[in-house]
Image (cartoon, grey):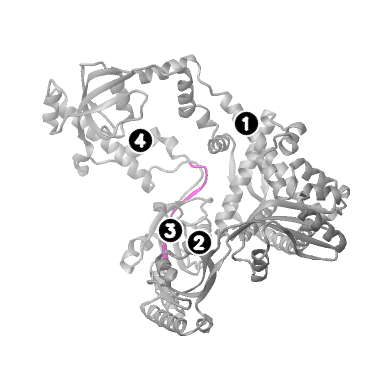
Amino acid sequence: MATLEKIRQRKKILAIVIGAALLAFIIEVGIEAIGRSGGNSAAAKVGSEKIDIMTFQRRVEQEASEDQQNDKQIDGALRQQQVLDEMINEKLLEQEFAKLGITVSDKEISELMIGKNPAPAVAQFAQQAGAKSPAELYDFIMNPGKQGVQESQVVELRNQWNKMKNDLTKQYMFSKLQNLMAGCMQANDLDRAQMAEDEAITNIVTFAKKDYASLPDDKYQVSDAELQAEWTKLKTMFKTDEDVRVIHYIAVNIEPSAEDIAAANKIADAAYIALQKGRGVDSVRLLGTVHIDTAMMEQKSLPIKVRDFFTSAAVGSTRRDSTVGNHHVMYKLINKELSIDSVELDYVIIQADAKTQQAALDQLNSGKTLEDIKKAYPQKVDGKLGDWQRIYTAHDSIKNKIGNATVGNFFVFNGNENGATLMRVSQKKAPKTFYTLATISYDAYASTKTSEGLRDKFQDFLNKNKTAKDFEENAAKAGYNATEVMISPSTAQLGLGQFGQNGIKDSRKAIKWAFDSKKGQVSPIFSDNNDVMIAVALDDIYEDGYLPYNFTQGKDYLTRKVRNNKKGDDLIKQYQGKAKDLNGYAAAMGAKIDTANVVFAANGDPKIGNEPGLFGRMAAAKPGTLQGPVKGENAVFVYQVVKQEKAERQPTKEELNNRYAQSRGAQIFANPSNIYKILTKATKVKKHLIDFY
């Protein structure tokens, strides 16, 4: 374990050097950001508490560093918004814990970390560190002197331990909050009786309907006064938590021209000819613009399109994939070999002189166990048994040493006069055929000439259309698509989530421009994303509060509501008293009679449509009584309950409790995402990232 710690310590020193430079950069950027924000130093305000911009930036840099280590490619603005939301949620929880007096005692956290049943994450962490138990690991990192290890060698492990302790404390407090909320929302006898009654009877309903969509819209004009009146009734639907900007944006993709593609095809053709003629891939490297990736893999891991070919092909064979868009791919089989795939290894690390190493090796091969060796040489031995490893990608020297080892005998894997690793191969899996395949790819990119031409054309359009109105009206004539969206300070990317698509990377500056500009203005070209040019027109500004009745999507919704109400009134007058039974009304409406099964507890029926109010009336209607005409949300209905069916069995108390939890109890309100929504509604949260970025 001490050897492992020394390796970790060297990594730590490097991290300190990098970290110092990074911290200086963060401080410099932070000071500049505060200057741009007019002196405001808060990334957000949660109730009366601030989230400091410098603290926020350090957190962003930390998570960005982790992204880089894990090969994650995340847009900077998206990462900033995610981190801010995390910090806001943490602050909301801290405040709620304080209000409710929720804490975690030392005894509780001790049980989680080193108790008889530690948290799974702690147990896994201890196992990865080579300890038998979390308690053993805790003793090692808190009392390194007992193991003959210097304090500096356990600092990194101790930091990881303390971070895990802090994370588990927060998780445990959150679980207490969940339990508290769940306990407050349990079904009582009245709730259970109501749910049982709501589900007890199914009404078989026959109905006819006349859809509002069958009437011409232009016959039912809607005035501004009517829209405003409807908006007032539904005002809470239009509440916003942040300022809103309505914009149109044009995104011009910087794509290769036909000339660029033709040139790329020539390069790809030349690369493939060179690949066919050359023994390896060095001849292709000379072209400079292609990407080459060489990997050793099993047959099942070969690319599907060429798997069958290379399974039987000779070494040196080549294959060209079909071009996808402007992406060219070709392959060359570099090698094909039979190799051991996986082995089960036992290893013992001993820190002692050569004589002791040999003695330990002899004892192991005579039948002594790892525990026997540890007792014989205290504080000098560590190890692991039954460790399966895939070795086919290892260096030949390592692969040969392990592959040629006698199964069941320990041998010196590596070492010097101060220590050695003793290894035993317990099992070997049967050899497999492995393929070393070179994948050569080339993408066609827009040339400088093409990029400049696209930019010049786009700039010419902006020069001629300097108002938001002209920008929108003339975009299509110029061959552009002006997309209308509403954005808030929390919008990290243009187009994110729109029609289910990904956002435009590096488009945050265009969003910020909209919040710094005046209504009717048109932005310059933003090209932080090298693949896209963006320009924005600011159509309208809605301050924190409520969206107005006449914003595009809202106006469409309100207009439809008012118009449908007018159509419903008109149809009621037209059909009221025109028939005495359902057949007569169906004939008058020119509609067919349909049937639906209606249960009061259900949400609706696809035949009836989105009609919650009507569905409730149908569930409560008396059998045999003609009802209607009745005005619904989307149609006028006439209906009759022709039969009632009682449930074959009464639900049990447990079943009713579960349904309550799922529909209106613990599973709804104790859900983590809903807890955050509830806390956000109860506490004023103000985000200020738009002031800094």
Q: Which mark is residue 505?
A: 2
How many numbered callouts?
4
Instruction: Name the mark on residue 230.
Output: 4
Instruction: Report whether 641 appears left or right of 496.
Output: left
> Please, what is the three-letter code of the amino acid marked with disc 1?
Leu
For the residues labelled 3 and 1, say whether their Cβ atoms are less than 8 Å apart.
no
Q: Residue at x 67, y 45 (%)?
A: 124
Question: Dot 3: within a 10 Å radius of its alpha carbon, few (fewer than 14), some, or many (20 or more) residues?
Answer: some
Whole-Å distance between the Cαs marked 4 and 2?
39 Å
Q: Secondary structure at mark 3?
A: loop
Nearer the observer, 398 or 182: 398
On screen, 582 above or below 72?
Answer: above
Stretch of the chain drawn in magenta: 240-253
**Dot 1 alpha-carbon crowd within 10 angstroms: few under 14, some 14 to 19, many 20 or more:** many
Mark 4 and mark 3 in contact? Answer it, CB < 8 Å: no
Tell me the element at label 2.
Answer: loop
Q: In this figure, which residue is indicated by the disc labeled 3?
A: 520
Q: Earlier in the sequence, mark 3 or mark 1?
A: 1
Q: Nearer the viewer, mark 1 or mark 4?
A: 1
